[in-house]
Image: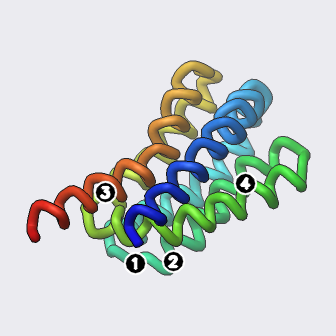
Amino acid sequence: MVATSAETLRQLTEIRLLLEIRVTVEIAKAVTPKQVTRLREIAMEIQGFAKENDLMNFIEMDRIFHSGILELSGNPMLVEVADQFRSRARIHALPYILESGQLEASALEHIQLLDAMDRRDLETVAKVMEHHINYTIDAVFAMSLVKKAAK
């Protein structure tokens, strides 16, 4: 099961990297302070849920956060497709992220992303997005290695 899940996650991650980074960089070029403030409120809630290891609320607010950013593109189909990919990736990855203790670090990247968007630092926006999307696949592979070593 891990191999199948890992391969599915690799494919989903590849698609998300292609879609979400470029779109988020474009959004960062025109995002308003009011939009950043609204997203920052959501990001702060996510941090609280991460600290409490409240996975259910974390997942829901994370979905709202990422959809909220992509909605700024004005492309509802993109929002829908990206949400489907993120949802499928979460099924495979979030238990590993929680188990690996990386939930808070993942939540912190939302703040880092918004800081970069607010500054219109497009290079940092791209780097944070790439790292953030790769968190899912990195966590799964790291935990599968730990579990193999424990056997």
| Real-space Cα separation, disc 4 to disc 2, in angstroms | 19 Å
Q: Residues within 10 Å of mark 1 (few under 14, many from 20)?
A: some
Q: Residues within 10 Å of mark 2 (few under 14, many from 20)?
A: some
Asked if residue 116 is positioned above or below residue 8 in the image, the reply reads above
Q: Residue at x 68, y 41 (%)?
A: 20
Residue picked out by circle 4? 82
Q: Residues within 10 Å of mark 3 (few under 14, many from 20)?
A: some
Coordinates of residue 132 in the picture (x, y in percent): 48, 44
Residue picked out by circle 1? 54
Mark in front: 4 vs 2: 4
Mark 4 secondary-structure assignment: helix
- Mark 1 vs mark 4: which is more N-terminal? 1
Mark 2 secondary-structure assignment: helix
Q: Residue at x 49, y 58 (%)?
A: 44
- Mark 4 vs mark 2: which is more N-terminal? 2
Mark 3 secondary-structure assignment: loop
Amino acid carrying mark 4 in the image = Ala
